[in-house]
């Protein structure tokens, strides 16, 4: 044992830096260092072992590391290796030649491996033989079989010897191996003859036990081919049946596992590929469907378009016909207008005109421009001013004015043609309307004159009747001794007054209707006006059995904003009506504020108005309750309420019948706006 | 000095009626039947008050009023416009031009017109006192 130990460790206790480098490198290939803790402890513990077994342990540890690294996936190790790949990597990473020979043999290849193995197998035997027979004898044997290039090396500071051999270039591998075998057999034979059968076989068994520790199965397997067949028979069998089998199974299993893993990863890859393809297929399908839909849509659109085109064509046809009809209608309308109609574009070129335009102006030449039309007027005519005014506003606002044209009076209007739907409201041109208002002017004038004349010519004789009868009664009463004569003169006088009233009412209503009556609105005290109106009746009223009163409100009324004279007229009319229809009783005026208005009520206890006739109040010439034939002509013209209504409304108020009951009385009310506080 | 009234009125009916009532009321009355005559008489007679109709031939009442008021000899004579034109505009115009009153003939009894004239003359006499 000590002998063998010496043989394998010529360097004694010295350190093996290359061994440290190897294991440090192996460790660096492993991510999960926790999993190799046990192996690493074993490695560090090996340093203190006897050197001989330490090298074997190192070799065995390499085997353990190799198994670990090759058997684990890249999560645990840095990358996946096969055993050969790992050995290659180690060869590249560190210097394997300086490793102990038992460890180094893991990394040798080709012919060199056979040489190294032979050295390992023979080391112990050669060392023993050298010690007992001398180096020369052993060298002789070795050279006999291996040739002159072979030698012996005495390892430093030890008594161990190693066979050195340089492989000749031409040597064939199998021949070389045969030479090693023969040499080994001769050396063993020499050992048996020198030490006896037992000791020689012990040397072989010792070597085997060391080799076993290295877990280098190839090395062991090869070793069994060298040794005599009767030695280590059980081990050889066990090795072949168990070790080798286990190793083979392990290798096969790991291969299978790898294959399975490969298959699995492949299948996963395949699956994802399939999924991808499935997805692509689905996308394709949906694209295809979309395309089909689009095609169908396009088809239906085309059909729709065809239908619509047909319908549009029909519409255009219809519309054209319609437009033509409209044009005809428009032309006819414009042609039949009672006014002259001239349409010009923006540059005042005449686009269209009706015959009436020429007729009114009494011209026969064609008018092509607006100027052709205007030049028929004198240079100082108002029409030129009108056009300037119109153009001053950029022809955007219509203007019109009366223009004298010879004996005629014309109303001439310039009106813009604007497309309202256009945002810019662009002016498309203008329309000139020429209306001959000569007749209308004459009529209006004659109407005005009629009223003046009526007022003057009717009133004057009536005033004479009234004045003269009045003077007869005043200054010649002593001569009217006959009561009938006096009554006749009185009737003539009263009739003249009534006629004057009727004429006045006619004139008033007509002026109100035409809006020719101006209201001079101003703030005034309505209470004061009511009192004065009542006083007028108390002074002039002959029927003293009718009580007239004004119920003053407790709070003074605000001033009203109206024409005091007109309000007085309305009050006189309403109070007068009350008096007229009351045989015996009272007429009462009240007033109060209602919102922004003052409301004045006139209540009488007269005979009342039947419901059927109430709606006729405030109408022209209406006297409630009477048909034309049964009118009570003593009661006036029937214009009183009508005039009152026009006046009150003209001042911004309202007038209405509040209530009326036959034989009980009537209440009228009107409102006037409260004057704004100054 | 008797108070002379000048009545300028083209309508004989009216002319006669107003002559009568003022004579009944003890006034001296002179008359003219058109505007021009009225203006001439106003200058020659220098009446206390002029009753002037508006609608008249030759020269209408408004024109006469203007001339009266433009002439220093006649501008202080009070002028009462008498008319049967009920136009308010006319009334306003007349007052602007210097008339003291505008009477719509049909609206008043002759006696009422006399009373109005009396009042105006009384007022004018009082005004005259300090300067007379």
Image (cartoon, coloured by chain):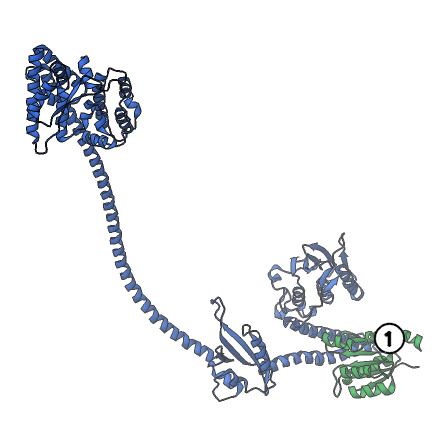
Q: Residue at x 57, y 73 (%)?
A: A393
Label 1: how many Cα within 10 Å (few below 14, some 14–19, many 20+): few
Chain letter for mark 1, please: B
Label 1 sits on a secondary structure element that is helix
Above or below residue A411? Residue A6 is above
Assign the C terminus of chain A to one quadrant of the image: bottom right
Above or below residue A576? Residue A208 is above
Could you tell whether B92 is left or right of B45 in the image? left
Above or below residue B114? Residue A563 is above
- Residue B74 in sight: yes
Q: Quadrant of residue B23?
A: bottom right
Q: Nearer the viewer, residue A532 or A171?
A: A171
Q: Nearer the viewer, residue B127 or A448?
A: B127
Residue A224: x, y in percent? 9, 20
Q: Quadrant of residue A565?
A: bottom right
Above or below residue A253? Residue A232 is above
Q: Residue at x 8, y 30 (%)?
A: A173
Q: Nearer the viewer, residue A636 or A554?
A: A554
Could you tell whether A443 is left or right of A159 in the image? right
Q: Nearer the viewer, residue A564 or A407?
A: A407
Could you tell whether A356 is left or right of A504 in the image? left
- Residue A246 in sight: no
Indicate the chain coloured green by its letter: B
Residue A90: x, y in percent? 23, 30
Q: Which residue is mark 1?
A: B118
Residue A322: x, y in percent? 38, 72
Indicate the chain coloured blue by its letter: A
Q: Residue at x 29, y 59 (%)?
A: A301
Assign the N terminus of chain A to one quadrant of the image: top left
Q: How many marks?
A: 1
Residue B97: x, y in percent? 78, 78
């Amino acid at each position: 044992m000590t002998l063998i130990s010496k043989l394998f460790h010529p360097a004694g206790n010295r350190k093996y830096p290359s061994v440290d480098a190897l294991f440090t490198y192996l460790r660096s290939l492993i991510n999960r260092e926790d999993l190799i803790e046990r192996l690493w402890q074993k490695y560090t513990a090996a340093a203190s072992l006897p050197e001989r077994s330490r090298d074997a342990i190192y070799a065995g540890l390499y085997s353990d590391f190799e198994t670990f690294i090759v058997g684990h996936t890249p999560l645990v190790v840095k990358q996946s290796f096969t055993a050969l790949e790992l050995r290659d990597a180690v060869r590249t990473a560190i210097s394997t030649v300086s490793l102990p020979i038992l460890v180094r043999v893991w990394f040798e290849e080709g012919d060199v491996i056979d040489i190294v193995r032979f050295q390992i197998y023979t080391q112990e035997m050669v060392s023993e033989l050298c010690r007992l027979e001398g180096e020369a004898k052993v060298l002789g044997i070795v050279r006999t079989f291996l040739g002159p290039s072979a030698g012996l090396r005495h390892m430093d500071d030890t008594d161990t010897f190693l066979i050195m051999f340089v492989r000749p270039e031409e040597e064939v591998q199998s021949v070389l191996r045969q030479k090693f075998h023969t040499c080994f057999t001769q050396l063993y034979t020499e050992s048996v003859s020198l030490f006896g059968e037992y000791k020689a076989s012990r040397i072989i068994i010792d070597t085997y036990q060391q080799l076993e520790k290295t877990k280098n199965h190839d090395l062991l397997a090869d070793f069994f081919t060298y040794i005599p067949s009767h030695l280590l028979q059980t081990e050889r069998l066990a090795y072949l049946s168990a070790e080798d089998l286990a190793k083979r199974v392990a290798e096969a299993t790991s291969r299978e596992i790898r294959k399975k893993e490969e298959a699995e990863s492949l299948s996963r890859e395949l699956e994802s590929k399939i999924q991808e393809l499935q997805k692509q297929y689905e996308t394709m399908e949906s694209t295809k469907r979309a395309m089909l839909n689009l095609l169908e849509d396009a088809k239906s659109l085309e059909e729709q378009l065809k239908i619509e085109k047909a319908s549009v064509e029909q519409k255009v046809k219809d519309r054209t016909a319609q437009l033509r009809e409209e044009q005809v209608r428009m032309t006819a309308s414009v042609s039949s207008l009672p006014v002259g109609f001239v349409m010009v574009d923006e540059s005042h070129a005449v686009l269209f005109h009706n015959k009436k335009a020429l007729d009114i102006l009494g011209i026969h030449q064609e008018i092509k421009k607006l100027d052709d039309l205007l030049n028929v007027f004198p240079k100082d005519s108002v029409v030129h001013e009108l056009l300037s005014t119109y153009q001053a506003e950029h022809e955007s606002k219509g203007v019109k004015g009366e223009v004298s044209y010879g004996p005629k009076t014309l109303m001439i209007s310039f009106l813009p043609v604007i497309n309202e739907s256009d945002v810019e409201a662009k002016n498309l041109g203008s329309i000139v309307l020429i209306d001959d208002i000569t007749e209308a002017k004459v009529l209006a004038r004659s109407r005005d004159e009629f009223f003046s004349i009526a007022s003057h010519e009717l009133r004057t004789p009536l005033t004479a009747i009234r004045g003269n009868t009045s003077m007869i009664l005043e200054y010649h009463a002593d001569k009217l001794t006959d009561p009938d004569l006096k009554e006749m003169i009185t009737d003539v006088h009263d009739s003249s007054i009534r006629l004057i009233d009727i004429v006045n009412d006619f004139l008033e209503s007509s002026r109100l209707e035409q809006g020719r009556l101006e209201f001079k609105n101003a703030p005034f005290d309505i209470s004061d006006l009511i009192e004065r109106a009542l006083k007028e009746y108390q002074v002039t009223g002959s029927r003293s059995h009718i009580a007239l009163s004004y119920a003053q409100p407790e709070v003074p009324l605000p001033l009203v904003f109206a024409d005091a004279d007109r309000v007085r007229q309305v009050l006189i009319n309403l109070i007068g009506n009350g008096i007229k229809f009351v045989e015996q009783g009272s007429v009462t005026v009240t007033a109060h504020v209602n919102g922004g208005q003052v409301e004045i009520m006139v209540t009488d206890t007269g005979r009342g108005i039947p419901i059927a006739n109430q709606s006729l109040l405030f109408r022209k010439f209406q006297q409630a309750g009477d048909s034309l034939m049964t009118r009570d002509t003593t009661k006036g013209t029937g214009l009183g309420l009508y005039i009152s209504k026009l006046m009150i409304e003209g001042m911004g108020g309202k007038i209405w019948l509040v209530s009326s009951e036959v034989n009980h009385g009537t209440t009228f009310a009107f409102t006037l706006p409260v004057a704004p506080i100054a | 000095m008797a108070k002379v009234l000048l009545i300028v009125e083209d309508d004989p009916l009216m002319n006669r009626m107003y002559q009568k009532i003022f004579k009944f009321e003890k006034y001296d009355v002179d008359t003219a039947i058109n505007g021009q005559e009225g203006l001439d008489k106003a200058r020659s007679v220098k009446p206390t008050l002029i009753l002037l109709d508006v609608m008249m031939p030759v020269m209408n009442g408004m024109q006469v009023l203007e001339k009266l008021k433009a002439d220093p000899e006649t501008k202080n004579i009070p002028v009462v416009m008498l008319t049967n034109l009920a136009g308010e505009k006319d009334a306003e115009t007349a007052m602007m031009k210097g008339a003291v009153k505008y009477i719509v003939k049909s609206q008043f009894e002759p006696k009422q017109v006399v009373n109005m004239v009396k009042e105006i003359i009384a007022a004018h006499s009082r005004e005259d006192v300090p300067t007379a």
